[in-house]
Amino acid sequence: RGFAHKSQIAATQLLAIHILTTIVGRIMVKDGDLLPDVELYETNPNTKVKLRDLFNGKKGILFAVPGAFTPGCSKTHLPSYIEGFNHLKEKGCEVVACVAVNDPFVMAAWGEGQGAGGKVRMLSDMHMDLTVALDAVLDATPALGGKRSKRYSLVIQDNVIRHVNMEEPKQMTCSLANVAVTQLSAL
């Protein structure tokens, strides 16, 4: 009887921890939050990029798209940062990175095809660690076959998120490069 009782207590404690972790882990990112301490991938699965190392001591932009090679992401979102790169740099931006829930090979090929080299780092969140940490999961099953990231941009200064620009579904306005240029000017 003692063993069964202890097992029930342990199971109840594990359930409580799971529920608490789920609730706490699902708080939407907001201005002033610290950038999540996660690893992303660049070029291939062996090339890990620690997100906090990338933005440590720097001003930068991290923007997310629902999917590489998708129409809005390829025609508008990523191009806004490639074309606006010099304006971002003039405002003190040292890092511009694009992230998506795609594998790193896809992200690398997409960046190459879009001419992102030397301007926008193309990062893969293939395990959704960042997407979940920011509570930015998008159920894109009908259009993209599974869960992806919401569209957003983050203006970051030394690993602190200064501005969160989270788009409403099927919108593409507040997360474009021109908004980031204005927000960088205010830092």
Image (cartoon, rainbow, N blue to C red):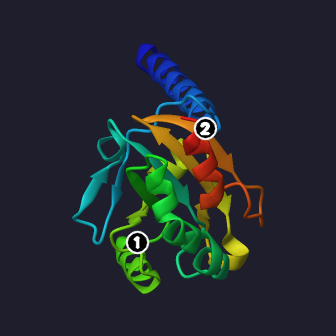
Query: Relative to 144, is 135 above or below?
Result: above
Q: Which residue does the image show at 53% across and 72% down from the upper left?
A: 83
Q: Which residue does the image show at 49% across and 53% down from the upper left?
A: 62
Query: Relative to 25, is 8 above or below?
Result: above
Q: Is residue 136 visible in the rendered structure shown here? A: no
49 or 92: nearer the eye?
Answer: 92
Q: Identity of the amino acid at label 2?
A: Val
Query: Relative to 138, is 76 above or below?
Result: below
Mark 2 sits on what residue? 29
How would you rate the neighbour count of disc 2 (Cα within 10 Å): few for under 14, some for 14-19, many for 20 or more?
A: many
Q: Quadrant of residue 31?
A: top right
Answer with left or right where residue 54 lies relative to residue 16. left
Looking at this rendering, what residue extends furthest in the front direction? 90
Q: Identity of the amino acid at label 1?
A: Asp
Helix, strand or loop at label 2? It is loop
Q: Quadrant of residue 167?
A: bottom right
> x and y percent of residue 120 in the render?
41, 65
* Marks 2 and 1, how far apart at CA: 24 Å
Answer with left or right where residue 36 lies relative to residue 12. left
Q: Quadrant of residue 104?
A: bottom left
Mark 1 sits on what residue? 103
Helix, strand or loop at label 1? It is loop
Looking at this rendering, what residue extends furthest in the bottom direction? 113
Query: Relative to 29, is 140 above or below?
Result: below
